[in-house]
Image: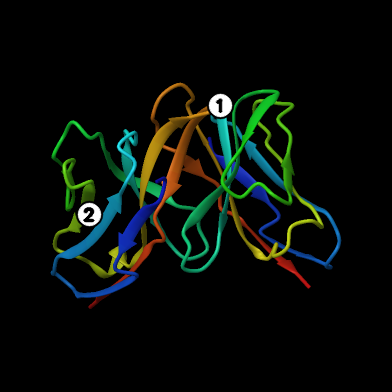
């Protein structure tokens, strides 16, 4: 089965701790994306990557970091600098190079206590 | 400039009725307009999409109407069913630094009454 895996589904962390969210895809897509979803605000782009070892800041990158060492993996680290990290985080992937459907993972709900 | 404004925030429709969700944008560089459907606790999934050189696209009960001069587009769900109850996001995509970016609207929660 081809698709995008995000783990864990639920994550709890204490304030001030960094936490890394996993995103893996076996769709052979070059492009990967991280979005944050808050109630009433839709999806906001955190970071995106069109190719391995390259990534760009999205609209709300402050307090987050990413890496893209492998085509199939795009982990997101929520750092202690993120003021309000509690949210639903969605990873997506697509074919690069043109406008294409983004395939989304099931999401990780992060709660910072 | 890169916002996509979506309305209404929520919508209640009787089974068999027509659901209409509207979106507007400012940046004329947007070149691809997808709609995504999201069920609770799941990631969004592409429903239907349109390019700005087309005024209408229909797939089954779902139709996108696109008005390039007004910079508006809308989703029509004909014969709405309870299974259509979900959150719908319009979006607009643009070529940005480092690749293609997609800007999402705030979402519309649709409830179809049986």
Q: Is residue A76 visible?
A: no
What is the quadrant of residue B38 in the picture? bottom left
Q: CA distance from mark 2 to mark 1?
A: 30 Å
The residue located at (69%, 49%) in the rendering is: A62
Are the residues under badges 2 and 1 in a single subunit? yes
Question: Residue B39 vs residue A36: left or right?
Answer: left
Q: Is residue A72 visible?
A: yes
| Residue placed under numbered mark 2 in the picture | B75
Number of marks present in the image shown: 2
The residue located at (48%, 63%) in the rendering is: A41
Residue B30: give x, y in percent of width and height: 34, 36
For label 1, the crowd category at 10 Å Cα-Cα, with few meaning under 14, some 14 to 19 and many 20 or more, is some
Question: What secondary structure is found at the residue carrying circle 1?
Answer: loop
What is the quadrant of residue B39 in the picture? bottom left
Question: Residue A88 vs residue A112: left or right?
Answer: left
Q: Is residue A2 above or below residue A34?
A: above
Question: Residue B37 vs residue A78: left or right?
Answer: left
Residue B17: give x, y in percent of width and height: 13, 69
Question: Residue B63 vs residue A111: left or right?
Answer: left
Q: Are marks 2 and 1 in contact (CB under 8 Å)?
A: no
| Residue placed under numbered mark 1 in the picture | B98
Q: Quadrant of the C terminus of chain B?
A: bottom left
Applied colour scheme = rainbow
Residue A59: give x, y in percent of width and height: 56, 46
For label 2, the crowd category at 10 Å Cα-Cα, with few meaning under 14, some 14 to 19 and many 20 or more, is many
Question: What secondary structure is found at the residue carrying circle 2?
Answer: strand
Chain for mark 1? B
Q: Is residue B91 above or below residue A108?
A: above
Which residue of the protein is positioned furthest toward the front in this rendering? B1
Q: Is residue A3 above or below residue A109?
A: above
The residue located at (56%, 53%) in the rendering is: A106
Chain for mark 2? B
């Amino acid at each position: 089965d081809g698709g995008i895996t995000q783990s864990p589904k639920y994550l709890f962390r204490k304030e001030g701790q960094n936490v890394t969210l996993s995103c893996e895809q076996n769709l052979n897509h070059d492009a990967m994306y991280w979005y944050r979803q808050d109630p009433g605000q839709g999806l906001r782009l955190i970071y995106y990557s069109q190719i391995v070892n390259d990534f760009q800041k999205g609209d709300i990158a402050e307090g987050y970091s990413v890496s893209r060492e492998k085509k199939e993996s795009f982990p997101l680290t929520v750092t202690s600098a993120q003021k309000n990290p509690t949210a639903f985080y969605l990873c997506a992937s697509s074919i690069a190079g043109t406008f294409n459907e983004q395939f989304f993972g099931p999401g990780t709900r992060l709660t910072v206590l | 400039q890169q916002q996509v404004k979506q309305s209404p925030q929520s919508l209640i429709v009787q089974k068999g009725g027509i659901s209409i969700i509207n979106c507007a944008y400012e940046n004329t560089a947007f070149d691809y307009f997808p709609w995504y459907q999201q069920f609770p606790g799941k990631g969004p999934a592409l429903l239907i999409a349109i390019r700005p050189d087309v005024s209408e696209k229909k797939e089954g009960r779902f139709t996108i109407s696109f008005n390039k001069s007004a910079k508006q587009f809308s989703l029509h769900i004909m014969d709405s069913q309870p299974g259509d109850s979900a959150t719908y996001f319009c979006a607009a995509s643009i070529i940005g630094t480092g690749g293609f970016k997609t800007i999402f609207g705030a979402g519309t929660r649709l409830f179809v009454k049986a």
